[in-house]
Amino acid sequence: MGIISEVKCARCDRKYSGVRSRCPYCGARRIGRGKYTDEADNSKGKMWIGILIMAVLVVAVVVMLLATPPQEVESPVNTLDNSTPSSLIPDESENDTLVGEDVPPSPEYINEPDTTTAPQPPEVRAVTITYGGRTKTDFTVRVAEIVPLSVRIDPLGVDAEIIWTSSNRNVFEVVPVDLEGRQVRVTGTGVGTATLTVSVGGVEAECIVRGRAAG
């Protein structure tokens, strides 16, 4: 149903739109509001306009409520007791270490000096030149003659370098038999007297060698 009211023609008694100045059916000129105006139809149009206006107002109110930020409610301040409970006060003994103070490392991180030392080899106490198991301090050798000698070290089992030397190779020469040098061969090379020396770990032993001519 339209919002514009209808009127009745005074001549043919038919309804037509109120915007017309003549009746579309008989052509009679409309006088004033016409013979009849449909008040019921006009009231319906006003009702729809009122509903539309109310809907617009409701939407506007909802938009305003959503756009307004909620106000923060401040919690009441307890002015009666502002003291901190004793259970929350840190113990001074727990805070003895000041900022920047050197903190000693934990015992498990302290590098203790290594007191364990490798066992030291035994030191040589005495060295003896032997011949056939007997101590030899003086013997005679002829030219081209070979005399086997050995060295006895006290204590036994000492691992040290063994060095044999001849004071005069024109009288005799000394040549090691084994790799360790515990056994040697003394060969006469001439006539005279010289000294055979064996050194083991800084300890020495000497033997007089007397060279004689062959024959």
Image (cartoon, rainbow, N blue to C red):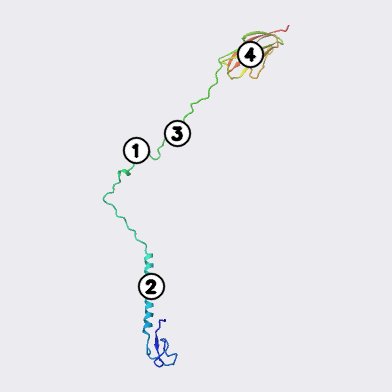
Earlier in the chain: of badge 3 and badge 1, it is 1
Task: Tell me, for residue 55, which label it has, or none.
Answer: 2
Which of the two labelled residues, at mark 2 and mark 4, occupies the earlier sequence position? 2
Q: Residues within 10 Å of mark 3 (few under 14, many from 20)?
A: few
Query: Is there CB contact under 8 Å for labels 1 and 2?
Result: no
Q: Could you tell me the amino acid type at mark 1? A: Ser
Q: Which mark is residue 108?
A: 3
Q: CA distance from mark 1 to mark 2?
A: 72 Å
> In front: 110, or 101?
110
Q: Residues within 10 Å of mark 2 (few under 14, many from 20)?
A: few
x and y, in percent, of residue 159 in the image = 59, 20
Q: Nearer the viewer, mark 3 or mark 1?
A: 3
Q: Quadrant of residue 42?
A: bottom left
Please report contact status of discs 3 and 1: CB closer than 8 Å, yes or no: no
Do callouts 3 and 4 mark residues in contact (Cβ within 8 Å)?
no
- Mark toward the start of the polypeptide (1 vs 2): 2
**Mark drawn on residue 200:** none
Q: Percent from the top left, x then y, of residue 190?
A: 70, 10
Q: Secondary structure at mark 3?
A: helix
**Dot 2: what SS?**
helix
Q: Residue at x 63, y 13 (%)?
A: 150
Mark 1 highlights which residue? 93
Q: Which residue is mark 4?
A: 150
> 34 above or below 136?
below
Q: Secondary structure at mark 4?
A: strand
Label 1 and label 4: CA atoms lie apart by 77 Å
Looking at the image, is mark 3 or mark 4 earlier in the sequence?
Answer: 3
Image position of 191 (left or right of 73): right
Mark 4 crowd level (few <14, some 14–19, many ≥20, 10 Å Cα) = many
In the image, residue 201 lies at what x, y percent? 58, 18
Give the spatial CA distance, label 2 vs label 4. 131 Å
Q: Nearer the viewer, residue 193 or 34?
A: 34
